[in-house]
Amino acid sequence: MSPLRRSTRPSPPPERRDPLLEGWYHTIEFPDGRRSKGYFDHRTVVDRYGIPASLQGFSALDVATGDGFFAFEMERRGADRVVAVDINSVRDADWIPRMRKLVPETTMDLETWKEHFEMAHRLLGSSVQRIECNVYELGPDVAGTFDVVFCGDLLLHLQNPIKALVNIRSVTEGIAIIETPIDVDLERAFPGKPYLRFGALDSEQQPGELNTFWRFSTRGLQDMMVYAGFTDPEAQGVFDLPPHGIPVTSVVARAG
């Protein structure tokens, strides 16, 4: 084309923006062409976790669902029944006592998880059931039992991750998929060692303000799942969460 000739190709329509879709945790696409502006965008890595491509004939649980991306994804993959559990507010997270008193001052986004989930649920026409539940309270009497249980990006925020895994095991009849951020230095320097790193003092102004306690190695996560009652923990490999490049590991294990 001559540089002096103006293209007659129509410009793409501008992306529809909605202030209600700003500031989400998950990026979720909706049938009307909109999508939430999530801090993370799991769409390009969703197949790295080890979630079966088809869940037809299975029940599924999403632990710490947040805005609901993985619950809706398991529904999209054909699960017969999907339940999502989470707390409703950042205030209810597993803060150390001193920081719990300061949460309103240090956390901007306090009350949006349930609101975002419900909005996504409505826009997707979803049938996922959401239950308000802390992972420390999770059990068959609260949510039932499931063929596939997913839990992502939760263990690092818990003071007692093995208790959480024990509870997740109690509702797992088939497989559990656990993903968590790793410590790259541990993963590289001590491959195959069950090591964990504690805390985030190098990134905090006040100890505990990020509510981040643990960075795992892959082997550390595998062994902790065995202690919680799982068998055959299979590492799915380390990958980065877009767009911030946070390295994570995912492990799929069976109910013992």
Image: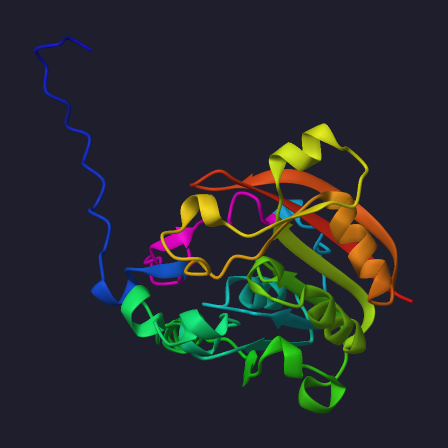
Which sits in the foreground, 193 or 253?
Answer: 193
Decide: is 166 above or below 234.
below
Can you name the residue that lies furthest to the top here? 2
**Quarter residue 231 falls in:** bottom right
Image quadrant in which you'd find residue 184: top right
Write down the quadrant of residue 243 in the picture.
top left
The reply to whether residue 72 is in sight is: yes
> Which image quarter is the C terminus in?
bottom right
Please say if 189 is above or below 58: above
Which segment did they paint magenta?
26-46
Q: Main secondary structure of the magenta part?
A: loop
Residue 32 painted magenta: yes
Indicate the colouring scheme.
rainbow
Residue 57 visible somewhere in the drawing: no
The image shows residue 101 at horizontal and vertical percentages of: 37, 76
Q: Position of residue 253 (x, y in %)?
A: 82, 58
